[in-house]
Amino acid sequence: MLRLPLSVLSTPLLRPDAALLALLEQQAETLLAKLPDRGNYEHAIRRCIIQLLREGDPSLERVAEKMNTSPRTLRRRLEEKDQNFRAILEDTRCRLAEEYLSDPRLQLSEIAALLGYAEQSPFQRAFRRWKGQTPQGWRNQLQQ
């Protein structure tokens, strides 16, 4: 067994080896892929999206960062399950929009902000794409 002082770990490499780094990352990814999948991966992504919507940046990169993985790995794992990040993000926003619209105390501009939209008009366009009607029309239908 080789023992080294902890200070050796903080010593910078004089010549980093990119090929070695790529090999080590590939091996780590292979080992991680063999681990059992604990819990629902899509559910974990949705949880991260919901948290990041509050901060205004539910991007693939930020979700990957929150899940302690790379964007490439996140994308690949979703592709393995015939899913994609954009569809999960849109579906999560749509479900939240439906929930928020059922609360008459929330204004449309507030709902747009809660869903990570900078303005109300992109939210309205997205909602029309999802449901075929405006958010206000959906809300009116709920209240009848």
Image (spheres, rainbow, N blue to C red):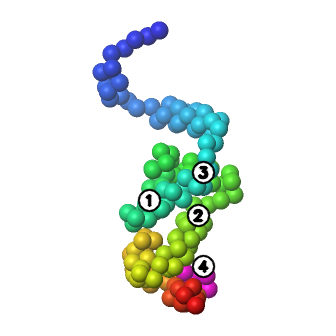
Mark yes or no: residue 5 visible: yes
Residue, disc 1 = 51
Viewer-nearest residue: 45 or 39: 39
Disc nearer the start of the sequence (2/1): 1
Q: Amino acid at mark 3?
A: Tyr
Mark yes or no: residue 75 visible: no
- Does the magenta-highlighted stretch encompass residue 131? yes
- In the image, the segment drawn in magenta is 127-132
- Does the magenta-highlighted stretch encompass residue 97? no
Residue 1 place in picture, x, y as percent = 47, 9
Q: Amino acid at mark 2?
A: Ile
Disc nearer the start of the sequence (1/3): 3
Work out how far the residue at label 1 is from the one at label 3, CA to CA, in angstroms: 16 Å
Disc nearer the start of the sequence (4/1): 1
Badge 1 crowding class, 10 Å Cα cut-off, few under 14, some 14 to 19, many 20 or more, is: some
Residue, disc 3 = 41
Disc nearer the start of the sequence (2/3): 3
Residue, disc 4 = 130
Q: Amino acid at mark 1?
A: Gln
Work out how far the residue at label 2 is from the one at label 3, CA to CA, in angstroms: 11 Å
Work out how far the residue at label 4 is from the one at label 1, CA to CA, in angstroms: 22 Å
Residue 91 place in picture, x, y as percent = 59, 69
